[in-house]
Image (spheres, rainbow, N blue to C red):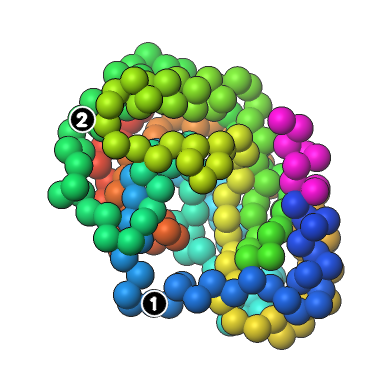
Amino acid sequence: MNLSAHYDAMRQAALPQLARGAAALDPLLDSAQDSRRGITLLARPPAAITDLIEGIMADFQFLEPGQYYYPVIDIHLTILSIISCYPGFTLALIDPARYQAIVHALLQARPPFRIRFAGLTASPGGIMMQGFPQDAGLANLRDAMRAAFRQSGLPHSIDQRYSIQTAHATIIRFRTKLLQPKLLVEKIEQYESLFIGSFEVNTLELVYNDWYQRAQHTVVLEKYSLG
């Protein structure tokens, strides 16, 4: 996949809708009844990267204070959604240790990989940091995980919603009517190619999580060091 073209196409499709003030608002962001939970393998950018992202979010927050801005501790890069979030899912429905064992076996002696964050893209529902793998490590890891879980016989929903190929990080979600839609679009365009930084992914987490990866709803099942 040409990620630059993919992110550009996403942005170009979303901006006219956002400029009209027709953002796709998330009705569950503030719902105490949202019971959607899942299992995810993820990575977290280092503080040097998230500090810069926090500054970008603050710029948007000045224009649109009512939207949802990801806390720095929640910013993440999804490696693979093993069980996509659905209502009522709990850890009691699976044997977490079997999932941990598969991931542990696959990550033994697997080298770190690098990601470059540069620019913003958008959808009708939010704004994402564009991520670009700098080597084949992420793609190879995802392929290995897909194969292992398909052969495992364990319940999973890998690729049922879509086959993840990107390396983006969602940083803003829309939850209320846009106050300044045209200025918001201009701000997205201002940041569409800004280089944020490159970083090595050397630690992964297998987590039980909600739809938004909020820390208060996250259970870290296991952490893994690469290399």
Q: Position of residue 71 (x, y in %)?
A: 47, 64
- Left or right side of 107 for 29: right
Residue 33, quarter of picture: bottom left
| The C terminus - image quarter | top left
The residue sitting at 33% across, 77% down in the picture is 32
How many neighbours does mark 2 have within 10 angstroms: few (below 14), some (14-19), or many (20 or more)? few
Instruction: Give the amino acid at mark 1.
Output: Ser
| Residue bearing the label numbered 2 | 98
Instruction: Please provide percent x and percent y for residue 200.
Output: 54, 31
The span picked out in magenta is 1-9
Viewer-side residue, 62 vs 38: 38
Residue 194 shows in the view: no
Disc assigned to residue 1:
none
Tell which residue pokes out farthest to the top in this image.
109
Residue marked by disc 1: 31
Label tally: 2
Q: Residue at position x 69%, y 65% from top?
A: 124
N-terminal of the two: label 1 or label 2? 1
Give how far apart the Cα atoms at labels 1 and 2 are. Answer: 32 Å
Q: Report helix, strand or loop for mark 2.
A: helix
Q: Main secondary structure of the magenta part?
A: helix
Disc 1 element: loop
Residue 176 in sight: yes
Q: Quadrant of residue 154?
A: top left
Residue 156 position, x and y percent, is 35, 37
Percent x, y for residue 39? 34, 45
Q: Amino acid at mark 2?
A: Arg
- Horizontally, residue 66 falls left or right of residue 215, namely right
